Amino acid sequence: MPSIQTNELTKRFGDGTVAVEDLDLTVDTGEIFGFLGPNGAGKSTTINMLLDFIRPTDGSAEILGMDTQTEITAIRERIGVLPEGYEFDEYLTGREYVEWAIETKGADDDPDEILETVGIHDDADRTAASYSTGMAQRLAFGMALVDDPDLLILDEPSAGLDPNGIQRMRSILRDRADDGTTVFFSSHLLSEVEAVCDRVGVMSDGQLVAEDTIEGLRKKAGGRSSIELECAGQPTVDNVETLDGVAEVVLKETTLTAYCTDSSVKADVVRLVDDQADVVDIFVEETSLEELFNRYTSGGRDGSGTDETERASQGVSA
Ligand SMILES: Nc1ncnc2c1ncn2[C@@H]1O[C@H](COP(=O)(O)OP(=O)(O)OP(=O)(O)O)[C@@H](O)[C@H]1O
């Protein structure tokens, strides 16, 4: 049984915005799943529907085999949640918030251990409202960890965290996953999910445009690289274009750039161009996962991809 399953999940807001459209998503038990997408892609709306904070216009979702609209109370007992933009009031300290989370869940966690785990033990007796953004995020994360949930749903968990905090969060997520917890977290940073996730789903404009393992994404990205050659003389594109493994050649004055689908063809490109125009400098760029992510999402909800990503997108079917 998957930990999360959505079936044509759709949210249309009153102003006509289709935030999520026909989303079919499966998160398997025990995996760390990264839910990726640029700002406005529909990640939070999806999470809010999963948690029954908002109701879908169409479709349905199940968490741990239970319907999110009719069985949310039972679901909540078994999941840990880090919502977006958690705010703390001035009456309770960090420790009291953790104690409250433990009590609410009827759990028997040691508050000190949780506070220590997320790195705010020294500030535990200060009012949580006085915490910095990163400290508040650590506290909210700690509260999500209470009662060793079967599933963690985290909306942008590294928001506001410093590099140490991000490192600590990643290692906690890995530890929890090793112990059998399923982790589902959203991020707009590929580097973020790349470091910890088994699988990712990429959202763009409310739709799931890719769902794969990091390795699968890497394979898709790995086939393409570019080589830019600065020449002393004037190169021509003709011979280079016909090489097997060269997809496209662009010539700007004395700089020739070859986009290659086969990485090994680069040496032939250099030899060929050097023979006719004396290569004086070489720049090689391998397609990164980041670039692949940009292609899938056209650089953002407004579609304002760079020239680079727009050109690159011609070679990708999402
Ligand atoms: N209550 C609402 N009313 C109208 N539109 C909304 C509402 N909430 C979200 N939206 C719109 O739905 C779309 C998806 O928003 P959502 O917050 O789900 O994106 P996101 O991927 O979580 O973005 P971010 O990374 O910026 O948090 C956006 O166009 C947003 O403006």
Image (cartoon, rainbow, N blue to C red):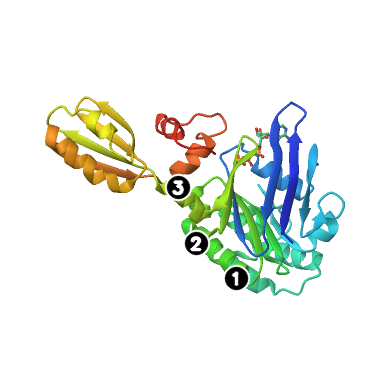
Classify the position of the C terminus by image quarter. top right
CB contact under 8 Å: marks 3 and 2: no
Viewer-closest of 309 and 46: 309
Which quadrant of the frame does ligand 1 lie within? top right
In space, the residues marked 1 and 3 are separated at their CA atoms by 25 Å
The kind of secondary structure element at disc 2 is helix
Write the residue at 33% across / 41% down: 245
The kind of secondary structure element at disc 3 is helix
Q: Residues within 10 Å of mark 3 (few under 14, many from 20)?
A: some
Viewer-closest of 256 and 110: 256
What residue would you read off at disc 2? 167
Task: Work out whether mark 1 precedes mark 3 in sequence or the reverse, and give the earlier one.
Answer: 1
- Under mark 1, the amino acid is Asp
- Under mark 2, the amino acid is Gln
Viewer-closest of 293 and 238: 238
Task: Work out whether mark 3 precedes mark 2 in sequence or the reverse, and give the earlier one.
Answer: 2
Q: Which mark is residue 269?
A: none
Residue 302 at x, y percent in the picture: 56, 29
What residue would you read off at disc 3? 289
Quarter-of-image position of residue 306: top left
The kind of secondary structure element at disc 1 is helix
